Amino acid sequence: MLKNKFQKIFIILFAIALAGCSAKGPTYSSLPDEAKQPRKGMAQLIVYQPVSMNLRSLDIEINRVKGCNLAAGTFFLLDVPPGQTTISSSIWDAPGTSSLTINAKSAHRYSIRIQWDMGKSMGFAVAGIPGGLIAESASSHSGPFLIDSIDEETSKQELAKLKQNTQCH
């Protein structure tokens, strides 16, 4: 039984390592400084999904327009006009849409981290749809993800090894 547990742990860790290798873009730290600045009159979003136990790609929408299919361990940069900006994501097999609305200001950068809400994921894993629905109703936010605006220092650390998803716009 112990051998079986170690095999499962090894498979999970191997899958996480492969997910990080599958992204082909440059790392955030290797981007030139000018790429990390918003264009004149715009704000810049840095949207990223850290590597986690769940390796699914997420469809990201910006102001209800599909922006990207964001793999775990990747990020994308997007300049947006100043004003209300909503970042959202949902998946077919979990209820609700997760979203975050910010008031984007010209010449500002916003680091947006999207990650699985492990409490809700565990509800589904343990008790199926009823467990997921109970976890959803007990949560303070809608949808299967946590979408947060992250401070610059934390985001620099988290982005350091992530790769740019060059298929995003």
Image (cartoon, rainbow, N blue to C red):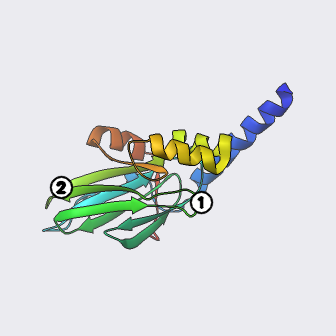
How far across and down, in percent of the image, does residue 90 sit?
48, 61
Residue at figure coordinates x 26%, y 67% from the top left: 79
Sequence-first tag of 1 and 2: 1
Q: Is residue 156 visible?
A: yes
Report whether 52 appears left or right of 2. Answer: left
In the rendered image, the vertical position of residue 164 relative to residue 131, given as above or below: below
Q: Amino acid at mark 2?
A: His
How far across and down, in percent of the image, does residue 9 sit?
72, 35
The label nearer to you, 1 versus 2, is 1
Q: From mark 1 to mark 2, how far is it between C-alphas?
A: 35 Å
Looking at the rendering, in which quadrant would you find the C terminus? bottom left
In the rendered image, the vertical position of residue 73 relative to residue 35, given as above or below: above
Element type where label 1 sits in the image: loop
Q: Which residue is mark 1?
A: 93
Looking at the rendering, in which quadrant would you find the N terminus? top right
Q: Which residue is mark 2?
A: 108
Residue at figure coordinates x 53%, y 41% from the top left: 118
The one of 140 and 1 positioned closer to us in this rendering = 140
Report whether 17 appears left or right of 1. Answer: left
Q: Amino acid at mark 1?
A: Asp
